[in-house]
Amino acid sequence: MADKKQQAEQMMTMAQMQQMMRERDALKQMNCVRIACQVMEVMEFEPKQKMDKNKQPIFKDNGEPDMMEKGFWVSGATMGSEEGFFLNEKQVQNIEVGQTYLFSGRLKNRKVKIDTIELI
């Protein structure tokens, strides 16, 4: 009788472990990033010419260089660290230095890709 009780407890433990693993895997696949920080600096980057995988310049059909869109690097202070994000021209329009924002997005190529920005 005691052996069956121990086996039932072990099965319960195994079922709990499997549930925990499923929850952990779901969190890993969610890929959601949210960072609240106070904007310290906004730096503008001039557009650069796009390059292919072999580092050769890419040109449009009319022969003009194909350029990346204008970008901005936003530095923000969080509790105990400093974070930076690359934003496009549309996203940076309402950003003010000294204000606190919630930046939400996802990881893409080991960098945070910001989707939404909310004033806190």
Image: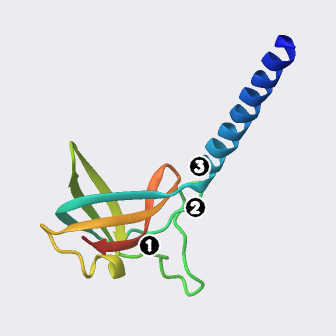
Residue 76: % across, % down:
22, 57
Q: What residue type is labelled 1?
A: Met
Q: 62 left or right of 4? A: left
Q: Which of 55 and 104 is in front in this view?
A: 104
Measured Cα–Cα span from mark 2 to mark 1: 12 Å
Q: Which of marks 3 and 2 is in front?
A: 3
- The answer to which quarter of the image holds residue 113 is bottom left
- Dot 1 surroundings within 10 Å: few (below 14), some, or many (20 or more)? few
Neighbours of disc 3 within 10 Å: few (<14), some (14-19), many (20+): few
Above/below status of 19 relative to 119: above
Element class at badge 2:
loop
**Residue that carries the numbered disc 1 in the rendered image:** 68
Mark number displayed over residue 52: 2
What's the CA distance linking mark 1 and mark 3?
33 Å
Disc with the residue nearer the chain's start (2 vs 1): 2
- Disc 2 versus disc 1: nearer the observer: 1
Q: Which amino acid does label 2 sit on?
A: Asp
Under tag 3, what secondary structure?
Answer: helix
- The percent coordinates of residue 71 (x first, y second) are 34, 71
Residue of label 3: 27
Q: Which residue is drawn at 65% across and 38% down?
A: 20
